[in-house]
Amino acid sequence: MSTKIVTNNQLDLKGIKGKNLVLKKSTTLKKIKKHWQLHLLVLIPLIFLITFKYVPMAGIVIAFKDYSVVKGIFGSDWAGMKYFQSFFESPNFALLIKNTLGLSVYGLVVGFICPIVLALALNEVQNARFKKFVQTITYAPYFISTVIMVSIIILFLSPSAGIINNILGVFGIDPINFLGKPSYFSSIYVWSDVWQNTGYATIIYLAALAGVDTQLYEAAKVDGANRFQKIMNVDLPGIMPIIIILLILNIGNIMSLGFEKIYLLQNPLNTNSSEIISTYVYKVGLLGANFSFAAAVGLFNSIINFVLIISANTISKRFSSSSLW
């Protein structure tokens, strides 16, 4: 038999730790009581987040079952990796990955750079009225709904009555069915997205530029730096943390393209370049009532995005001081 000998010092340490915990709890309760209005404001979105984002995660189990509406989620038979294998072995798998990644990377490169360039350009404008005018013009398209945006694109690119083809006709060029050519689809999607969202994204960078220390501009002026040198050595380093964080977030959503716009722009002529994972899941999984298949593909998408955002954050932490966590 062995006996433990507890010294007075150990008892004192335990007592001190216990008192510290009690003090921390009482301090936390006092803070909550003092700022209960702020905690109430946080509580509402927290309940919303838990109810609509975390609770539905239990439905992930559908991806591993032969889901039956009659039997329910937990009553359905296990299928294991059947639906994942079905997706990986699908003849459309390579095309879907290619189109999804192609559109995502194209949109990320163009759509990420344009707001930064516009923000840096607007920051150099001295005329306040002109600056506000440009901001309003570029920001306005953000409020156009997806359905209206697609209608505008279709009208503009119409082979018979579209403005673009009418302009081409003036120069003797035959009408082009832009939405009927698979090679044009990615550019139409990405650049219309840039037109719609650049103004909104610019606001974030302009706010970051407003926080750059004015003494840095004065020091650059004393050193004889021109506008371009000030942008490269003062503006860009000043907003670099914001750029890195937004880039990480965008990389984390690289497999999650907007379904609505692509589906509305899609037609039988451009399917080879417009069919992405989300539209395929809608057609095969949801319209065909194959919910287990849809859940499996959705989970695959989420895992890829999760790995990408973790990787991007890790690389950012290694090579810079900015990261999400």
Image (tube, rainbow, N blue to C red):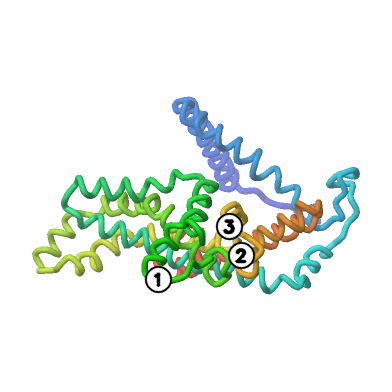
In the image: residue 240, left or right of residue 176: left
Earlier sequence position, callout 3 versus callout 2: 3
Earlier sequence position, callout 2 versus callout 1: 1
Check disc 2 and give the amino acid type.
Answer: Ser
Mark 2 Cα shell of 10 Å, populated few (<14), some (14-19), many (≥20): many
Q: Where is residue 254 in the image (x, y as percent from the top left)?
A: 55, 63
Q: Where is residue 116 in the image (x, y as percent from the top left)?
A: 34, 60
Q: Where is residue 132 in the image (x, y as percent from the top left)?
A: 25, 46
Q: Quadrant of residue 261?
A: bottom right
Q: Give the numbered dot on residue 172.
A: 1
Check disc 3 and give the amino acid type.
Answer: Leu
Of residue 243 and residue 189, the one placed in the foreground of this image is: 189
In the image: residue 157, left or right of residue 290: left
Please determine whether, in this image, residue 227 is positioned above or below residue 161: below
Q: Give the numbered dot on residue 265.
A: 3
Q: Nearer the viewer, mark 1 or mark 3?
A: 1
Of residue 50 and residue 4, the one placed in the foreground of this image is: 50
Q: Give the numbered dot on residue 274.
A: 2
Instruction: Give the number of marks.
Output: 3
